[in-house]
Amino acid sequence: MRATAAEETQSGTLVLLCLASWAIPGAGHLWLGRRAKGLIFLVALPLMFVIGLAIRGRLFPFDLAEPLVALAAVADVGIGLPYLIASALGYGGGEVRAVTYEYGNAFLIVAGLLNLLVMIDAYDVAMGRK
Amino acid sequence: MQSHMVLLVLFAFFVSLVFAVIAKDSAREQARLGGLMFGGFMLVGIVVSWLMYPFPLH
């Protein structure tokens, strides 16, 4: 059975919503009218990412020869545009000798993973599940 | 910013905040869940750090 035009429009909107929510933390919730939640995510997640960079965390490369590094890279990308901007500006090289190196990695990885959770939450809200 | 304690507090704060806001809708419920999670992070972090205290650094 072919999808109707309304269903196709809705699925297209959902894809856009998820993309926006990934790229800009909280954008999905703002789009759906959940302003308070969206603003909290918009401030908290990029701030957590910036702290991770400031304390010498590393943005891991996609190195498939080392599966854990590749998984960490996927988690890093989860934060969206801040990752792309930081990479383009040359941040996230990491300083392995710094006392805070592992803390920085934890902040960067968890910020990305939390943003992916936020994206899934926005999807659930859009689907009327919440 | 090299204090382990400050970094623990910051990490616990951000993770508790985001989880509470995702999981609950009312401000009261968010504050309750966030506070519980934050306290749990701090308690577990401090207990585990004391358990590691006897181990040598090098």
Image (cartoon, rainbow, N blue to C red):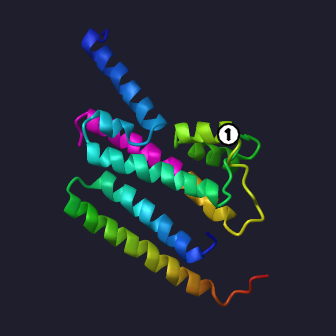
Quadrant of res A103: bottom right
Task: Name the residue at 64% across, 61% down.
Answer: A55
Relative depth, front residue between A88 and A67: A88
Give the structural element (helix, strand or loop) at label 1. loop
Compared to residue A87, the image places residue B3 above or below, namely: below
Q: In this view, does A16 lie to the left or right of A76?
A: left
Q: In this view, does B20 lie to the left or right of A88?
A: left
The secondary structure making up most of the magenta span is helix
Q: Quadrant of the C terminus of chain A?
A: top left
Residue A4 visible? The answer is: no
Task: Name the residue at 28% across, 9% down.
Answer: A5
Q: Is residue A124 left or right of residue B26?
A: right
Coordinates of residue B48 in the picture (x, y in percent): 55, 80
Residue A97 visible? The answer is: yes
Other residues around mark 1 within 10 Å, as few (<14) / some (14–19) / many (≥20): few
Residue A33 belongs to the span the image colors magenta:
no
Task: Name the residue at 69% across, 86% down.
Answer: B55
Compared to residue A63, the image places residue B2 above or below, namely: below
Quickly name the residue at label 1: A89
The chain carrying label 1 is A
Compared to residue A125, the image places residue A114 above or below, namely: below
Coordinates of residue A106 in the picture (x, y in percent): 59, 59
Residue A125 belongs to the span the image colors magenta:
yes
Coordinates of residue B16 in the picture (x, y in percent): 39, 63
Residue that lies at the very extreme toward the bottom in this rendered image: B54
Q: In which quarter of the image is the N terminus of chain A?
A: top left
**How many marks on residues?**
1
Magenta highlight range = A111-130
